[in-house]
Image (cartoon, rainbow, N blue to C red):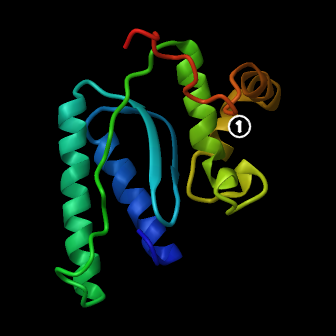
């Protein structure tokens, strides 16, 4: 999604959310950035969700490359990956990571300033105090560290 306009990003956000919610998936957190996106969701079928996302990638790659006359010269998407949540700690650290990603990449100073995420909705639903407790209890500074047993 490099070089993507704000209008195209907003349109993508809408199509992406429709794509996964239309499958009956529960979306907990998301953010769409100019060159990548993150989703935290519960799905009945990872394969089905990844297939639907892959079709969306293909459709939009074709449309955007055609609009910019770059057919066959540029790939818009690199793919999608899934990771199962291993614990409550993993879930909340991931949620914090997704919602804070626009800050991490320097697009905004506060996570609630990024328009293409559910950060404000999440804050409103959960309340400031609960979100602050979760932020401190599940920091992203050690995101992924020691989640897998050493023998893996």
Q: Is residue 125 above or below residue 120?
A: above
Q: Quadrant of residue 71?
A: bottom left
Residue 63 location (% of width, % of height): 23, 76
Residue 46 location (% of width, % of height): 25, 30
Q: Nearer the viewer, residue 23 or 29?
A: 29
Judged from this view, the residue extending furthest toward the front is: 151
Q: Is residue 75 above or below residue 92?
A: below
Q: Is residue 97 shown left or right of residue 84?
A: right
Q: Is residue 86 shown left or right of residue 75?
A: right
Q: Which quadrant does the N terminus fall into? A: bottom left
Q: Is residue 72 above or below residue 37?
A: below
Q: Residue at x 31, y 68 (%)?
A: 76
Q: Residue at x 20, y 65 (%)?
A: 59
Q: Is residue 4 shown left or right of residue 78?
A: right
Q: Residue at x 30, y 57 (%)?
A: 78
Residue 45 location (% of width, % of height): 22, 27
The residue at which mark 1 appears reads as 123
Q: Nearer the viewer, residue 56 or 123?
A: 56
Q: Nearer the viewer, residue 105 or 28?
A: 105
Q: Is residue 140 shown left or right of residue 69?
A: right
Q: Residue at x 72, y 57 (%)?
A: 113
Judged from this view, the residue extending furthest toward the bottom is: 69
Residue 126 location (% of width, % of height): 69, 28
Local SS, label 1: helix
Numbered circles on residues, count: 1
Q: Which quadrant does the C terminus fall into? A: top left
């Amino acid at each position: 999604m490099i070089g993507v306009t704000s209008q195209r990003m907003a349109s993508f956000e809408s199509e992406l959310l429709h794509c996964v919610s239309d499958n009956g998936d529960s979306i907990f957190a998301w953010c769409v950035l100019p060159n990548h996106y993150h989703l935290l969701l519960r799905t009945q079928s990872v394969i089905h969700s990844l297939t639907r996302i892959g079709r969306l990638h293909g459709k939009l790659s074709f449309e955007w490359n055609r609009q910019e006359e770059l057919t066959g010269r540029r790939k818009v998407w690199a793919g999608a990956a899934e990771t199962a949540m291993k614990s409550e700690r993993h879930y909340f650290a991931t949620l914090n990571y997704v919602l804070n990603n626009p800050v991490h990449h320097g697009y905004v100073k506060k996570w609630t300033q990024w328009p293409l995420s559910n950060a404000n909705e999440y804050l409103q639903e959960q309340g400031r105090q609960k979100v602050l407790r979760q932020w401190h209890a599940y920091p992203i500074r050690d995101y992924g560290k020691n989640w897998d047993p050493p023998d893996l």
